[in-house]
Image (cartoon, helix red, strand yellow):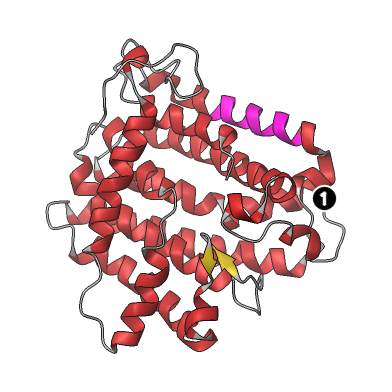
Amino acid sequence: MTAAVSTTPGSPADGTGAGPEAGSFDFPAYLEATRLQVETALEASLGPERPESLREAMRYSLLAGGKRLRPILCLAACELAGGDSALAMPTALALEMIHTMSLIHDDLPAMDDDDLRRGRPTNHKVYGEAKAILAGDALLTRAFEMVALRSPQVPAEQLLRVVGELSLASGAPGLVGGQVVDLECEGKDVDLDTLEYIHLHKTGALLRACVLSGALIAGAPAALLGALRTYARGIGLAFQIIDDILDVTASSDVLGKTAGKDLTADKTTYPKLLGLEESRQRAEALVAAAKAALEPFAAEGKAAPLLALADYITSRDR
């Protein structure tokens, strides 16, 4: 899956520090090729749900585009652990389904109340609030079907561990708990520890599940799983910091969602607590720590995609 085309040494996406093959790793080509594989698999992942209106609502959000970073993280972690990424594809799709569910539900009037997602009207604006809730529920349950029933070549013991990781990430210990604390903190003074709690759960938990699930499917040893947990924590917080910065600095057209929503909702963000410059510095430090955690496993160049993805998080503009 990895493309081996020369890149400019020292550029953010050259895979620096990924071992002797790093200089030949073309991250943009890898990202686009893997994204297209995920898109093709997603297109085929929804069966003939009935009623048809439910299927339409599920497809509307699931196939709305996006960077597909979560499934790509899963596939890249599987490759790092020496596994066949094709075996991880059903789980990668499951992670994108859980992520899509969280977006549908976050956009609801009772949550973040947003009208725009990925450059077009949010699910509830098109299908109504009730159908949007049910479409999210259907995607969440389909995610567990993808892992449990559509991964026949993966040992059951490994799939059971993946199901456990997805359950933790999508429930009260993960994104649901983080969302609750986020809602409870609107309009209140929030310290940095609470802010990081919110984002380690609301955003970071699913990113952790992405890298751990891919590695678990490959039968990764405990040492690598520990390094991936550290990596995921770093990129999870960095991802949210950059999101907070972009909410202030980018337009809705660029973001594909409503800019300035955090300010309107009186939410505490990293720029609000630390300022823009210190927030960016913090994101860069988190990414550096995330990459450092993978250095012991980077000798053969298999870490290049994950290292480049970490850099991409801080360099993205949407």
Range of residues picked out in magenta = 279-290
Quarter of the figure with residue 29 = top left
Task: Name the residue that disc number 1 marks.
Answer: 191
If the image is split into quadrants, where does the N terminus sit?
top left
Q: Position of residue 70 (x, y in %)?
A: 42, 49
Classify residue 75 as left or right of residue 156. Answer: right
If the image is split into quadrants, where does the C terminus sit?
top right
Quarter of the figure with residue 306 = top left
Q: Residue at (43%, 46%) from the top-left corner?
A: 69
Residue 173 in view, yes or no: no
Classify residue 229 as left or right of residue 237. Answer: left
Q: Residue at (51%, 59%) from the top-left corner?
A: 118
Residue 268 in view, yes or no: yes
| Residue toward you, 253 or 78 | 253
Q: Is residue 93 above or below residue 233?
A: below
Q: How many marks?
A: 1
Q: Position of residue 285 (x, y in %)?
A: 65, 27
Q: Is residue 138 above or below residue 117?
A: below
Q: Position of residue 142 (x, y in %)?
A: 31, 71
Asked if the magenta segment contains residue 62, the reply would be: no
Residue type at the position of mark 1: Asp
Classify residue 67 as left or right of residue 174. Answer: left
